[in-house]
Image (spheres, helix red, strand yellow):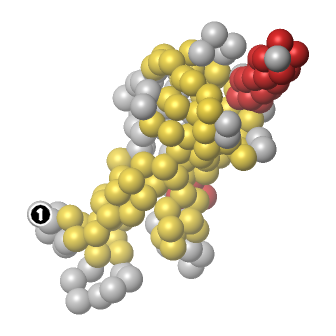
Amino acid sequence: MKRIILALVLFTLVFVSCSSDSVNGVWVLTEWNVNNGFDINNDGIINTNILNEIECVNNETLVFDSKGVVTSNNTFNPSIDIVLVNGTSNNYVFNVECDEEGVISFATTYTINGNEVLISDRVATVNGNKLSRVFVDAIKIYNEDLTEIIASKDLTLVYTKQ
């Protein structure tokens, strides 16, 4: 019986330490994904990764330490107004403003459960060297006079481990 308990304890310690080690380090924001994408820069190419469509500087990183703290010193925060042209189903006008007023930083705790990382009560998923966080209904689509939200889309942030 003691051997079984000891084996379970050792397995748990190895599993937790391996999971923690796989998250520790620097993760760079590499994708800002929206289903079906947009052609914000009017080059004729629709991208699901909005980072490929806008010229805002992106220096966002997440740094996970071994003590359960995640920090970011540069967050990526552009303002994007998406307007559906009246009478159309896929003709949009975009207003993009890059956040150049300063840097937003944060530090918070995280916990790991398998391939899920809980960051401030928001779940992120690790798959290999990619970490994804989904923000439900984060992208708003407005009517032409910007008085009504007529649709919304989820935004998925993808970070790549360095």
Q: Is residue 45 left or right of residue 80?
A: right
Residue at x 22% of width, y 71% of height: 150
Left or right: 62 with respect to 95? right
Q: Is 157 or 125 nearer to us in this picture?
A: 125
Q: How many marks?
A: 1
| Residue depicted at x 50% and y 29% | 119
**Which residue is the site of mark 1?**
147
Which quarter of the rendering shows the C terminus?
top right
Amino acid on which the number 1 mark rests in the picture: Thr
116 relative to 84, above or below: above
Residue depicted at x 20% and y 64%: 149
Q: Nearer the viewer, residue 158 or 94?
A: 158
What is the x, y in percent for residue 64? 64, 21
Dot 1 falls on a residue whose secondary structure is: loop
**Quadrant containing the N terminus in the rendered view:** top right
Up-down relation of residue 38 to residue 73 (above or below):
below
Residue 25 on image: x %, y %: 73, 23
The residue closer to the viewer here, 91 or 35, is 35
In this rendering, the answer to whether 162 lies above or below 37 is above
Question: Badge 1, how many Cα within 10 Å: few under 14, some, many 20+?
Answer: few
Which quadrant would residue 153 be assigned to in this image?
bottom left
